[in-house]
Structure formats: structure tokens, C-alpha cells
Amino acid sequence: MLLARVDDLASLSLESLMNIDVVSVSKRSEPLQQSPAAVFVLDGSSIIRSGVKSIPEALRLIPGLQVARLDSHTYAITARGFNSTVADKLEVLMDGRSLYTPMYSGVFWDAQDTLMEDIERIEVIRGPGAALWGANAVNGVVNIVTKSAANTQGGLEQMGGGGEFEGFAAWRYGGKAGEKGHYRVYAKTTHYTAQEAAGAGDAGDAWNHDQLGFRTDLVLGDRDTLTLQGDMYKERIANSLSSRDEAISGHNLIARWKHRYDDGADTEVQFFYDQTSRDETRTFTEDRNIYDLEVKHRFSIGERQNFVVGGGYHTTNDKIDSLNPGLLQFLPPTRKDETVDVFAQDQIDLIEDKLHLTLGAKYENNDYTGDEFQPSARFSYIVNEQNTVWGAISRAVRIPNRLDHTLEIFGGVLIGDENFTSEEVIAYELGYRTILSSVLSADTAIFYNEYDSLRSFTDDFLNPQTLPVRFVNDGAGRAHGVELTLRWEPAPEVKVLASYVYMDMDIAAKFGSGDVNIEQNDENDPNSKLSLRLDWDIRPNWSLQTRARWVDSLDDLGVDAYTAVDLTSIWRVSPSVELSVVGSNLFDPQHSEFSGGYEVSRSVHGQFTWHF
């Protein structure tokens, strides 16, 4: 088993890369090649080589994820279907802190940021992960892991601008804390220019994001470690329809203690606090506080059973005030919700070094629907060192949120319903990984998902016959598809990653429902998507990364198919100084990626980086 530093991943062979440990599938380290899930690891070096400046743009580098940009700051991101600006079936975490908002069970992507150079890896599971990660991990899990403070020692200064950026700058410094501990502090600011309106002209959505944070990793003895980390941010977004800017701010704090035992077992306790404030200027203001505690224990019984057990408590309280009650409001404006959960997973070696069975389940009790049980069964069969077959059957749910139960639109034309229950999926998956030669590997997954109790309307929302229109669970359907990823290394200095995704969805209202628009609301994903990434070290001090993607049309949204080509060139002037140029959408002045009337423009920016 190989546990490599992320900075070294770019130089690993294919066989070594497949043995990199991942933790998202089972909450314990296991080789990627043997993992019984559709998992992909994006290492930090690939993010740096790409030159991207935000987490959503980094997610474009991951096969199987659908990333669509609406305007300068809004994204629709999902896996295996149901994409929208309020996509609610993808669990996203950063260093164990869940990033989803209980307002609509999705992610406000404009508020999620960190120093890109501090990301160690991003692990992505396509398919349900609810047996360990809980409700809302319906179609996938994104786990963003940042580097330890020990791996970010010394100083970093960075600045640049051009294209979509009026300018950006970042600073970081790391040092020692005591004899064995380490720390880092950072600050960054990013100023984005406006995108283009579909009818040509400035969209009037320029914005800026300022953030600072810290991380401290302390060694408390031979068996105990303690991590403390936190961030604070604020941003302002121009709104062409309002006389004042949207204002967003927040801060968070994570404390994580880990104890190791002589027999190899370990216990981990994590607590985080997350506070957010949003002022949307025309619709609502939100103040939210989240507290989360999780305890997990990993241990083995004999040589063939590895357990992970644990539980947690999560509470959130909010205050959502309407700025335009005739348009939108949440009633009541304040709410507190609590969730208690326990989970267990047993990984069994049925045939040593050959056949592994993983059984897991999570039980949750929440204030919306009460008890929820989410089990999964996975297997992996290691044919030999080069070939692995895996499969899984899982159940996952998306529990209701503030939008489902308490939203009121257009003065009561559309209202939430406290009887709205959880959406659910039964997912079937089968995958195959193979190292075809020393320079070529392939990873394939096929899936079939059956959805039930999906959110729908009691009537035709655009032409209602009966008011008010309510949210109900009258939607159902299925999705199936295939995902293929190829890695090719024709030379030590050249690496190629290619991927293709085909997916077909069939979502409809159940017999007797008055909702005639559910297909348009839920089927917002391309049938096919093709991507290609080339990393080429032209010289020891000069590297090039080229990225191209073709995305099929979104017919229900009136979005045409498009091709985008990005290019990043990095010149290492010295061991401590780098100059880079990043171009995106180079062969297309502007194109639409989702609905909303905005288009993504061609952009070229430069960057200066100094390590000291």
C-alpha cells in the first residue's frame, strides 16, 4: 500500500497511482484500485497546474461531475442528474465540515473558498454515500481535504489579474508550533469582473470575495493529535436589478482530536461551528448558525473484519426575513432543527486479498420526517493486481428542508407543505478497473437509479386550476448511464486523462398528479459529455496543461451544446518564483452553460507566485 505526498502524485506511475489511499468510501484508508465505488481523486498538484482560482472550477477537472456556470458567481453542480442552481442531491464536505445549507439542501458555491494551493486532494464518489455520510448524499459525495500545516511551511505570495479577474492576491505563512506542532495563516482577495448577458452587454454582476483563515496541527503525545482550523469571509456582489450590492459573510471553526491505540484502532472526535449571513437585496436575508459533533471509532476483529462505527449530533437555527413578501418568504421566519445519527460499516475479507464485502448503514432521526434508515452493500473482487470488479446496492434519501416545508411564493400561489416527506433512491452500480499496460488504465462504471417520492407540484404551476399550489412527493422515475475514464502516459513527461459520460433520465409525475412540468424541472443534465486533459512537462521548468470538454445540449432549458478549451502554461523562473498564464474558453467568445440569460466569456489572466 502506498501513501504518497500529494506533491509527488504527478510523478507516480499508473500502478502506483491506483494504490493511493482514499478515505471517502469507507471513512478509512484503502487503495483506490480496491475501492468498491465510482471514486476519483483529484490531487492538489493537478489543481495548481490548472491555474483555476475557485472550487467550482476545480470540480470541472473531475470526470463524471456536471459543472455549469450561470453567471459570475452562480454554479449548478451535481453528479448523475438533477442539476440546478438549487441542486440538492450532492453532499459536499471540506475537512469534515458539511457545506450544504439546510435552506434547500444544496451549496451556495459563491461562499465556499480556500487557498487553492492548500488543497491536498478532492475525493469524489459518484453514486450514493448515505450509509456513512448521511442524508443528501443521494447521487454523490465531494470531499475536499486540505493539506496539514506541516506541509505548508514557509511563505507564499501570489497576485495576478486579467480576463474575468479585475485582480487577485493571496498570502500564506506557515511555521512551527512547539516541538512537533505546526501552523499556517492565510489571507486572500479576489475581484471578479461581470459576465455577459445573453443579449450582449455587461451583465452587471461583478463581485469580490475576501477571506482569511488558519490551521494548527498539534501533536499531544505519542498517540494523540489535535487540529484547529477556521475561516472568515465576506463578499459583495453587484446586482443590476437593485440599487445596492448583495452582501454575504460568514465564519467557521473546526476542532478535531484523534487518538490511536496500540492495536491499530483509533478514535476521532470532531466538532464544527458554521455561521453564515446573506443579504440578497431583492428577496431575503438569512442568518444561520450550525453546530455539528461527530464521533467515530475504527477497529478490527481478527484479520478479516474492519469496522467503522460512530454517531453524531447536528443542529441548525436560522432567521430568514423577506425583503419582498409578495414575491418570496419563509413562514415562520425562524426555525431550529436537530438531527441525531448513528452509523456502522463492516468490511469483510471473504477471500483474503480477493473478495471483499462491505455492509453499512446509517440511522438518522430528524425534525422533518423522523426516522430514516439508509443501508448499502458493496463488494470488490480483486482478480489480480491489475484488475478489479466491484458492485453496490444502496438506499439514500434527501430529507426535506426549509424550501419544501415553509416557502411561500407570489403571496401564497405556491407554498411549502409540512407533510412533504423524503425523496429516495435505490441505486444499483457495477464497475471495473484495469491497468491495461504500464502506460494505460481504464475505469468504467454503469449505474441504474430508481427514484421515488420526488418533489412535484399539486397543479400546473404556470397555469394552476386550484390554488394554492403545494409541494408534494408525486414524482418518480429512473436514471441510467455509463462512465468511462482513461489514463494514458505515453512518456514520463506526458499524461493524458480522458473521460466520457452517458446518462439518460426519465422523470414523471405519478398518475393523477396535476404537475405537467416535472420533466423540465428535473431533467437539466446533458445526455453525453466528453472531456480531455493533457499535462505536458515540456522542460523541467516549463509545464503545460490543456483541457477540453464537449457538453451536450440541455433541450428543456434551450441551451445549445458547446465545446470549451482551456490552456495553462507555467514557467518556473527559479525554485521559488513561478509565472503562469491561464486561458479559458479560448475558442469561443461566450457561451451559455445553463438557463438564466447569462453567458460565460473567454478569459485570459496572468499570475505571479513567490515561495519564500
Image: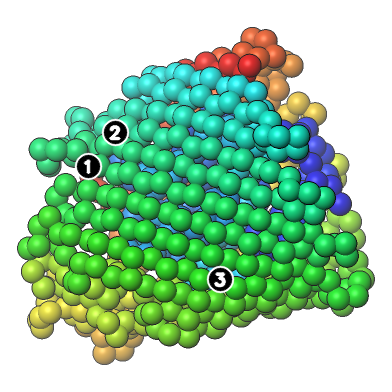
What SS does tag 3 mark? Answer: strand
In the rendered view, would you say 169 is above or below 453?
A: above
Residue 424 appears at what percent x and percent y?
A: 46, 78
- Where is residue 333 drawn, in percent x and y? 20, 67
Alpha-carbon span between mark 3 and mark 2: 37 Å
Amino acid tagged 1: Glu
Residue of label 1: 246
Residue 417 lies left or right of residue 449; in this view the side is: left
Q: Quadrant of residue 533?
A: top right
Q: What residue type is disc 3 on?
A: Gly
Camera-near label (3 vs 1) is 3
| Residue 554 rendering spot, x and y as whole percentages | 36, 54
User: How far is disc 2 from disc 1 in space, using C-alphas?
Assistant: 9 Å
Does label 2 or label 1 sit earlier along the sequence?
2
Task: Name the residue beneath numbered marker 2.
Answer: 207
Q: Earlier in the sequence, mark 3 or mark 2?
A: 2
- Provide residue 481's location: percent of width, then percent of height: 55, 65
Does residue 572 appear left or right of residue 424 in this picture? Answer: right
How busy is the neighbourhood of tag 3: few (under 14 within 10 Å), some, or many (20 plus)?
some
Disc 2 residue crowd, few under 14, some 14–19, many 20+, Cα 10 Å: many
Work out whether mark 3 precedes mark 1 in sequence or the reverse, and give the earlier one: 1
The one nearer the camera, 259 or 373, is 259
Q: What amino acid does circle 2 point to?
A: Trp
